[in-house]
C-alpha cells in the first residue's frame, strides 16, 4: 500500500506518542518532530507507510537512547493475553466451526494496541464481538471477510508461514496456529520481527506466549513495523518466496505486502480511515482478505 | 497560548482539509504539506497556534488560487443559523435568567464548525445542551464557567468589544449582544476578521446575520484564525487597548489572547485535547473564563 497524504499527520502523532513512551523531554520531542519534518519533502508517497514508521521509531530510539521503549507494554500485553488463553480455547472447543472461531479470535487479537489502556478493553471487546457484533455482512460472501476462499486455499497446501504483528496478540495467533497444526495437520512457521519496533512481537514474545508448543518460530530480520522485504534477512526472503501460503497479521504487514503477487491472506482490524479506504471497508471492521 | 507539540500533527491535518475544500489535487496537496514541513523546524513553540494557522491557510489560498475556499460553507452556516434565530430568541424570552441563557447559547454557537456536516448536528446539540447537558459543574462556582465573575465585570462597564469567531455562530453572538445592548444598556462593538481565514466571520457575515441591528461592526484587520495583535490594524489596536471589557469567542481567539493582560472573558467550546489541557477542562466542555 502506498502512503496516503493523511498518513503524514499520523506520522507526527506516532512520533510524539513513541517519544513520550520513551520518556523524552519536550526539547527532544521537538527535535524528533523537526527531523521528521525535514524528511517529509523527500519521502515519496509511493513508499509504504512502514518505511516512514521505521525511520520514526529508529529516530525515537536514537534520540531517547531507549532501545526498546515498548518492552514493558509488550510484557504486560503478553501476560494479559496469556491469562485469557484457557477461556479463548474453550470458546473454540464449544464452537460449531472451530476454524472460523479461531480466525475471528486471531483478528480480534489485533485490537491489542500498544497503549496499555487499550488492552483493558480487550475482554469487553471480545465479548462484544462474540455476541454477533463481529463486522461481517455475509460470512460466505463478503468482500472483506473471505473465509470461504481462505478455507479453500488452506485445503490446497501443506505448509504456511504466519507473519506476526503485536505482542499479546501472539496468544490469539497461537489459537489459530493450533487449529492449523493440530486439527488440519498443516506445518506452520511463525515469523516475528528481527529487532524491537513499536510493540511488534519478537522471538521472546513468541516463546513467552507458547507459540513453540505448536509451531516453529523464526524472525524476518525486519526492523520496520511491517514486513518490508528490503529490510528482511536473506533466509526469510527464501522462506517467503517458497511459501505455499502466507497468513499476514495486522495493518503494518498489510501496508507492507498488499501489492505483493504472492498467496497471502491478510487478517487485521482496520484501525484508521486510510486503511479502510484502501481496503474498501469501514474503520473498525474485521478484515480477512487475500488470495 | 503557546503552541503545544500536539498542535503539529493537527497543522498538517488542517492543511489537508483546507486544501481539499479548496479543490486542489493530490500533487498540490503534497506541495502544501512539504512547504509546511519545511516551516516546522523554524516555528518556535512560544508562538501561538494561529500564527501557524495563518501561514497554512494563506499557503492553501496561494497554491490553490482560491481566495476564500470556505465562502460557500460560511454562507450555508449563516443561513442555517439565521433560521434558528426566532426559536433561540424564544428560548431566551422563556428563561429565568436571560443573560445566562444568552451566554450559553453564544457558547453553543461555537460548535458550528467549518464542515457543513457538523452544522447539521447543531439543532440536536442545542436540544441536548439545553436538557441540562451543558457541562458546568456548578454554575456559580466553576473554574471554567465563571458566570458570576462575568456578570460582575459587566456591571462595572458601559462598553464592550466582542471578538467574533465563525460565520453562522454570528447569529448566536447576536442574541447575546441584544441582551447586552437592549436589556443591560451596554454599548457593543462587534469585531470580525479583516480577510478570509477559514470560516471566520467577515463584515459580510455580520451584516447577513443582522448584527448591525444591535451593534456597530468593525474589523480587526487580522488575517489569522485568531486575533493576533501584530496582524491587526492600528485602529483596532487602539480600540482594544481602550476597551473596558472584551468578550472573545472561540478557540482561535483564546489561543491568540489568553496571555494578554486585559479584561477579557473567553467564551468557547473546548474542541481539542491541547486546549482542554491549557484551560484545565475536558474536551467538549463549554468554557467561560477570564477576568
Image (spheres, coloured by chain):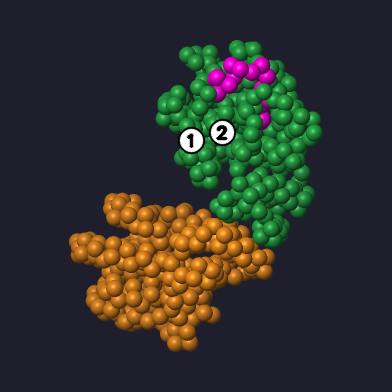
Chain colours: A orange, B green
Q: Is residue B159 magenta?
A: yes
Q: What's the residue at 53%, 62% (across, down)? A: A15
Label 2 and label 1: CA atoms lie apart by 9 Å
Residue underneath mark 1: B285
Percent coordinates x, y for residue A287 in the rendering: 42, 61
Mark 1: few/some/many CA within 10 Å (<14, 14-19, 20+): some
Q: Is residue B247 magenta?
A: no
Mark 2 chain: B
Mark 2: few/some/many CA within 10 Å (<14, 14-19, 20+): many
Percent coordinates x, y for residue A9 in the rendering: 58, 57
The stretch in magenta equals B150-164
Does residue A46 appear in the picture of this structure?
yes
Percent coordinates x, y for residue A149 in the rendering: 39, 69
From the viewer's perspective, is residue B115 above or below residue A3?
above
Q: What's the residue at 51%, 75% (across, down)? A: A228
Image quadrant in which you'd find residue A8:
bottom right
Q: What's the residue at 72%, 26% (across, down)? A: B242
**Which residue is outermost to the front?**
B261
The number of callouts visible is: 2
Residue underneath mark 2: B268
Query: Would you say A180 lies left or right of B186 here?
Result: left
Amino acid at each position: 500500500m502506498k502512503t496516503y497524504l493523511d498518513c503524514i499527520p499520523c506520522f507526527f502523532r506516532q512520533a510524539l506518542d513513541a517519544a513520550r513512551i520513551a520518556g523524552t523531554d519536550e526539547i527532544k520531542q521537538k527535535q524528533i518532530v523537526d527531523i521528521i519534518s525535514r524528511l517529509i519533502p523527500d519521502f515519496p508517497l509511493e513508499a509504504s507507510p512502514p518505511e516512514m514508521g521505521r525511520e520514526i521509531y529508529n529516530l525515537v530510539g536514537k534520540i531517547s537512547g531507549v532501545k526498546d521503549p515498548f518492552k514493558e507494554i509488550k510484557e504486560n500485553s503478553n501476560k494479559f493475553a496469556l491469562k485469557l488463553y484457557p477461556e479463548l480455547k474453550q470458546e473454540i472447543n464449544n464452537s460449531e466451526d472451530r476454524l472460523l472461531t479461531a480466525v475471528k479470535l486471531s483478528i480480534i487479537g489485533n485490537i491489542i494496541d500498544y497503549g496499555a489502556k487499550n488492552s483493558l478493553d480487550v475482554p469487553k471487546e471480545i465479548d462484544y464481538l462474540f455476541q454477533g457484533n463481529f463486522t461481517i455482512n455475509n460470512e460466505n460472501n463478503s468482500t472483506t471477510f473471505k473465509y470461504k476462499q481462505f478455507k479453500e486455499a488452506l485445503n490446497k497446501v501443506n505448509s504456511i508461514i504466519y507473519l506476526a504483528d503485536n505482542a499479546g496478540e501472539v496468544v490469539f495467533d497461537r489459537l489459530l496456529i493450533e487449529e492449523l497444526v493440530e486439527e488440519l495437520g498443516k506445518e506452520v512457521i511463525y515469523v516475528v520481527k528481527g529487532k524491537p519496533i513499536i510493540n511488534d512481537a519478537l522471538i521472546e514474545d513468541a516463546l513467552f506466549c507458547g507459540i513453540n508448543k505448536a509451531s516453529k518460530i523464526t524472525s524476518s530480520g525486519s526492523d520496520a513495523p511491517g514486513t518490508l522485504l528490503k529490510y528482511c534477512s536473506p533466509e526469510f526472503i527464501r522462506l517467503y518466496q517458497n511459501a505455499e501460503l502466507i497468513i499476514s497479521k495486522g495493518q503494518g504487514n498489510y501496508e507492507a505486502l498488499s501489492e505483493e503477487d504472492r498467496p497471502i491472506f491478510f487478517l487485521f482490524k482496520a484501525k484508521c480511515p486510510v486503511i479502510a479506504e484502501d481496503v474498501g471497508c469501514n474503520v473498525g471492521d474485521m478484515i480477512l482478505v487475500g488470495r
